[in-house]
Image (spheres, helix red, strand yellow):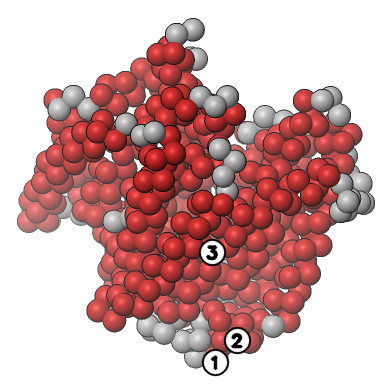
Amino acid sequence: MKQSDQHVSRARHIVGNTLVVGACFALAALAGILRNIVIARQFGIGADLDAYYAAFKLPDLLFTIVAGGALATAFIPVFAEFLAAGDRAGAWRLASALTNLVVLAVAALAALAALAAPWLVRIVIAPGFDAAQQAETAGLMRLVLISTVLFGISAVQGSVLNGFKHFLLPAVAPVVYPLGIAAGALFLAPRFGVRGLAIGAIIGAALHLAVKVPGLLHYGFRWWPVLDLKSQAVRRVAWLVLPRVLDLGIFQLTLLVTTNLASRLGHGSVSALEWGWGAMQLPETVIGTAFGLVAFPTLAELAARRDLAGLRSTLAETLRLVLVLTVPATCGLLLLGRPFLQVLYQRGAFDASATDAVTVALRFYAIGLVGQSTLELVARAFFAQQDMVTPLFVKMGSAAANILLAFLLIGPLSYGGLALSNSLAVSGEVLVCLFILRRRLGGIEGRRMLSTLARVVVAATLMSAAVAAVMFWGRQGGSGAFGLVALGGGLGVLVFVSVALLLRVGELYRLPAMLLARR
């Protein structure tokens, strides 16, 4: 096969599979929206939800350190070697050892965190809460820590299924988790208050694990009560996972600092940031995370073959596709974010003031959507070359910038400054990573990328003008939020696609063919 044909085939593979993965993420996002609708109606935003979201920060950090996304990156290659050699018993023994290690580590850390919960909340997590709110946060955190242990087990089992190249059930797991929380909000919150949500989180975590059981049984699940600390395979996983754990841990620490600062800004600030972040994550997950997950195996294969030309062209092609999709999405969030939030959540206890508060956070987070989405891909370009250290050092610089900017911007912009500091820091992180990759790969087709970006910006600008006009005339005519979203969103897509095609944005021409391709 010619090199150009190979490049087209790789691009089609990435885009086609991204569509499948993105569809799963979209379904999970819909489940998350349903959860948020139920929570919004019951609680609005305020002291109760501030305590609930703050209670997750330390458990999320513990999960990330012990069994987060880093585990799959390190575990799957080692697990796959056993499968390739036909040694299923060895593969299951490795999975057993890691499961046991994760359970012991998470359970021990969770027990310590539960004992120290009041002190941790008062000093580290939410010093700005009053005494009653801090006590509620500590109680909620103790419940949430139970779900963290379940997630630790589920993370290993999901990696096992991915090692067998089974992706459906792990993709379904994020769909059922928010449904457990929604059930807690509907059926438990009326009796137990916000603690009903925490119990729902435990139920959701149990479902997150249970949904994988049929797949595990299908592949001959086996478990041994072993740790195998002297095993070469276990030590390899530990060695590979360490830099990535530090990377993700630093990210979680910045979120913890953000919560610490937001707790000092009055009731609703923590919740507003959480909901704004979640709304920005909808397009980021469907676009950025999906492209990153699907492109990673191809990038790793090219790196293993030392095919720098193929690695460079595949990375550049995928980056341009991400830009074509995320630039207009950013404009859409900035312009239609408020009516979008109104349509989804503004009912019951979630009133207009809650919508306004979340809109502020969403707009500042939306500024970083392009950076967040491209980082998913750029970081994996380093991982594909088995370089976990360079992204770690860049992440450390980004975290320092994030915290510094947070202290500078919190005064003039309140919690909006905390969201903006995140957006600016991650955008700078991506630029630094791209500069390093450019030198390492001998270029990243920069001129072509800038040309595409310039045309996309022009198309997105005209799209924004059209959407702004629709919103102005719609409000003058008394149109509701749903009408503004439907008309503005529909016209915006039409204008963007039309202008981009006129400007010959090549990625937009090729996208339909790639999606329909069977290869």
Between 462 and 31, the residue placed more toward the observer is 462
Q: Amino acid at mark 3?
A: Ile
Residue sitting at x 81%, y 32%: 82
Which callout, 2 or 3, points at the residue further toward the start of the chain? 2
Residue sitting at x 51%, y 42%: 382
Residue sitting at x 18%, y 35%: 455
Labelled pair 2, 3 in contact (Cβ < 8 Å)? no
User: Residue at label 2?
Assistant: 135
Q: Dot 1 lies on which element?
A: helix
How many marks the image carries: the answer is: 3
Disc assigned to residue 250: 3
Labelled pair 1, 2 in contact (Cβ < 8 Å)? yes
* Mark nearer the viewer, 1 or 3: 3
Residue sitting at x 50%, y 86%: 127
User: Residue at label 1?
Assistant: 131
Residue 452 coordinates in the image, percent (x, y): 23, 33
Label 2 neighbour load within 10 Å: few <14, some 14-19, many 20+: some
Label 3 neighbour load within 10 Å: few <14, some 14-19, many 20+: many
Between 370 and 268, the residue placed more toward the observer is 370
Gap between marks 2 and 3, in whole Å? 27 Å
Label 1 neighbour load within 10 Å: few <14, some 14-19, many 20+: few
Gap between marks 1 and 2, in whole Å? 6 Å
Left or right, 269 with respect to 257, comes to left
**Residue 59 appears in which quarter of the rendering?**
bottom right
